[in-house]
Amino acid sequence: MADSALTLFGVRRMLEGVVPPTMVSVGEDGTPHTNYLSLAEYVDAEHLALSFQFFNQSRKNVLATRRIALSLDDPYTGAGVVLQAEYVRTETSGPVFERLRAKLAGVASHSGMEAVFVLRGADVFRVLEMRYVPGRKELPAALPRCDLAAGARAVSESLAACGDLGDLVDAMMCGLAEQLRIEHAMLWMLEPSCEAMTLLASHGYPERATGAELPLGDGLAGIAAREGVPVRIGHIAQMRIYGRAVRERASQLGLDPLCNAEIPLPGLAEPRSQMAVPLRAMGRVIGVLFVESEHNQFFGYDDEDALMLLCGQFAMSLDRLRAIGEAEAEVPAPVVPAQSGQALRVRRFSQDNSIFLNDDYLIKGVAGAIFWKLVRDYTREQRSEFTTRELRLAGTELRLPDLQDNLDVRLLLLQRRLAERDAPVRIEKTGRGRFRLCVACSLQLIDEMR
Amino acid sequence: MPSLSPDQIAFFSAGIAHQIGSVTPEGRPCLVRGLAADIEDDGRVVVLLSGASGFEVLEAIRATRWIALNMTSPATYRSMMLKGSDAVAAAAGASFRGLLETRHAAFRTNLIPLGFTLEYTSSWYSLPDEDIVAIRFTPTLAWNQTPGPGAGQALPLGG
């Protein structure tokens, strides 16, 4: 009865839940029980994992008789697969549990049901046999969007050629668009406090949102950063309906509104697929690459594999470039900058180092502190040439103990935010570890206490 | 004989998906996608399927007569399961073509907002008359399977 040509690896896209998998379990009394599954996860060639969220009849059956049948449907062709599986164990930690937990949190983030969607365990099953469902008139399979392996190789080569942080970020974002046909992407960097992420770069959005903040754990990107694993959802419309159904049954539970963002978050109005991949280097998560699409099931397992590799390389390169950032630094000579036009009011609120140019919010945190030091030195000492080394040494003065790790990324963030705002103050890189503050008008500095 | 409530009966025509589960005498679970369901005058539920697709389930039902039919709306995720222990299967032929097409049209309409093409479900519903099989059973247990708190609890039949 089993089809020996079928492999679990070959049908792992059917586990994604675009068409929700269905399970039949059997009770101790020999009665069948049929139910839809919330989440299924490919583990390896012989195993899959199902989410254990609630104590219910099917859970009781699984523990009692250990045997299930699963029905899976191909979201493109309509082909069906039925498999027999045997319960092996429940994991409450480790990579499979973390992946399922992150995925569940991703589902919850689209439905505002974080309090209800709690993963108790990952039930691991060994697949005993698989077969196709006969009697169906299958549709042609969708053509691949691009050659993922060749595209990823091209992006990898571009990343490897970069000797500068800004170039590295640009190579990554351009590569995603041009080589991998990913039209909407954001690069989030973890703040030193590890409580939030800041948007360093994006493409495919009308908003200019560099410097926008996202609390850790919020949305798919925030979850990927918190859990340190990739999270992918390919059928957001279904997830919203699923969440609505849960919410209606749990109306007593309140929803936490998202934080008040000072820079509006970019994003598609109606995304259908999203994926967030952590940027990991030296065992730490330093940020997240977030991609999305207006098409269902746009990102598959293969995309996840490819982006995990590229994000690993990107994160390691970024770490490395930060380390060699000041190799050519020299002590700069003071210069008298040219000024013209109306004075720009620069206000700094010391509590969180938030900066306003006239009445417009610019940035806060480490990047805000850096900006304040630069404009203060500029007005006091009449110089516009700076080095990253002196900023690093000024870490104590800036009261930024984590500056060592984050200076270069924050500087790049500040540089891009200023350019994006078309501000009369700009930062230009003049060499490795050296940069210039270009000021097109006179500055009036106001240090506000708040 | 327990009967379904008007709300439960109305759910049959709400453009839902069907999954038919059963079990062999050896305790091996099996399942197949159902295509349409309705309530008959005698209070029994009739559920249609492709005989070719459901060969394993039909064999199990012949042996144990157990059925666990899950019905879920893709538009709302409302989900209900009906169980019976007296299921019988028989060739249905063209007599159920009308019901099949009505249910398919309603189901398809619910799937369009989710991004599925009209032709997607045709891969499941393009079966010849001679492949249409009807399973009839008396629902003796109903379960709420709408996700969230309360999922997996027995529902009262009738009333």
Image: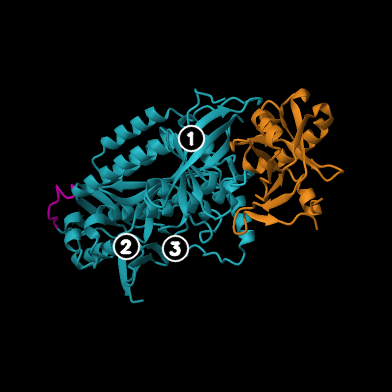
Using the image, name the chain to which the residue with label 3 belongs. A
Q: Is residue A100 magenta?
A: no
Q: In the displayed structure, would residue A376 be above or below residue A176?
A: below
Q: Is A329 contained in the magenta span?
A: yes
Label at residue B1: none
Residue A178 in sight: yes
Relative to residue A50, is residue A400 depicted above or below? below
Give the amino acid type for the residue marked by disc 2 in the picture.
Answer: Ser
Mark 2 or mark 1: name the one nearer the start of the chain.
1
Disc nearest the viewer among 2 and 1 = 1
The residue under the point 52% across, 56% down is A117
Kindly identify which numbered label has been placed on residue A262.
3
Instruction: Kindly indicate which chain is depicted in cyan in the rendered structure.
Output: A
Residue A266 visible in the picture: no
Q: Are marks 1 and 3 on the same chain?
A: yes
Q: Chain of mark 2?
A: A
Q: Which residue is mark 2?
A: A193
Per the rendered image, the range of residues in magenta is A324-333
Q: Residues within 10 Å of mark 1 (few under 14, many from 20)?
A: many
- Distance between the alpha carbons at the discs numbered 2 and 3: 18 Å
Q: Are the residues flagged by discs 2 and 1 in contact, CB closer than 8 Å?
A: no
- Which chain corresponds to the colour orange? B
In the image, A392 versus A288, the foreground residue is: A288
For the point 78% across and 25% down, the residue is B129
